[in-house]
Amino acid sequence: MVVAMGVEWPWMPRPWGGWMVVATAMGWLDSGSHGCGVATPPSLALPPLPVTDLELEFRYRGRQVSAVTISHPHGCRLFHSRLRPTCERVELFGPLALEQVPFPPPDAIPNQKQRFYTQQLLEVLDRGLLLELQGQDLYALRLCQCKVFWTGPCIFLCFGEEWPDQKPKEKKLIMVQVVPVAARLLLEIFSGELSWSADSVPLQISPPDLKDKMVEQFKELHQLWQNQQRLPTAQPQLVTANGGPWVLPPP
């Protein structure tokens, strides 16, 4: 199965155009900027994958402030507001079924200027950004005023500042990295970093012939001989006429 990236918009429009495909999950296995196709061998036995799980990492100017794994099958909503979605507010805040993920507060930011501008962006994130993973495609819908820029194949969302530009992502006020768990596990499998068990490896071994059986017998005999060598040697004991042990006189 070969997949490729979907859309190449540098930033997400408001919802007038509907949901947009940010990237394909399988496309993150490729290191190219456009997510060139990746083929999965049909004979490769893969473990069950959490196909709808998303790992989110929140960074404020390069410093990680929060990390969360979303396991909700309908996706999530990233927001910063005291208002909660209701049945009457679906058009404002999105479906109620989404998992609600608030942005971390900027209180722990030591720099006053950084904290001020971060708070300015958070105040226009009240309606939020919706994320949903459908099959191999990650969909995003921006409801908030804050513009959201993104890059792939590893998806980085930049809130309120142009991206990519001359500044590194460590200088951006608010960045969120989005990683589908299924894509990360597949990457670890292909790179050999995932722990594996012997029963998942199809070993190729020929049936034994006569010479192989002779070698097996020699191995068994050799093992018996080694075990015999490890046994302690019994010391002979002299017995007197009356049945008691005979003790040698001292020299």
Image (tube, rainbow, N blue to C red):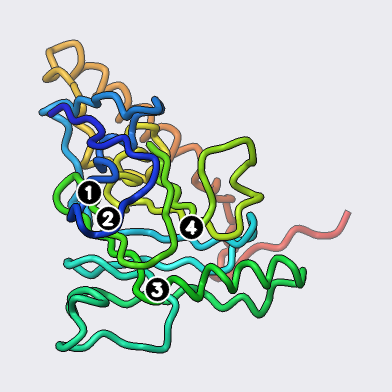
Relative side of 13 to 1, left or right: right
Compute the Cα span from label 3 to label 1: 18 Å
**Precedes in sequence: disc 3 or disc 4:** 3
Which residue is depicted at the point 76% across and 72% down?
112
Q: Are marks 1 and 4 in contact (CB under 8 Å)?
A: no
Q: Do the residues labelled 2 and 1 touch (CB within 8 Å)?
A: yes
Which residue is depicted at the point 39% across and 34% down?
192
Disc 4 marks which amino acid?
Answer: Phe
Determine which quarter of the picture holds residue 244: bottom right
Disc 2 marks which amino acid?
Answer: Ala
Which residue position holds label 1? 20
Which residue position holds label 2? 140
Which residue is depicted at the point 20% across and 16% down?
212
Disc 1 marks which amino acid?
Answer: Met
Compute the Cα span from label 4 to label 2: 13 Å
**Precedes in sequence: disc 1 or disc 4:** 1
Which residue position holds label 3? 79
Secondary structure found at label 2: strand
**Precedes in sequence: disc 4 or disc 2:** 2
Secondary structure found at label 1: strand
Q: How many marks?
A: 4
Percent from the top left, x then y, of residue 93? 26, 77
**Precedes in sequence: disc 2 or disc 3:** 3
Which residue is depicted at the point 55% across and 60% down?
174
Near-viewer residue (224 or 202) = 202
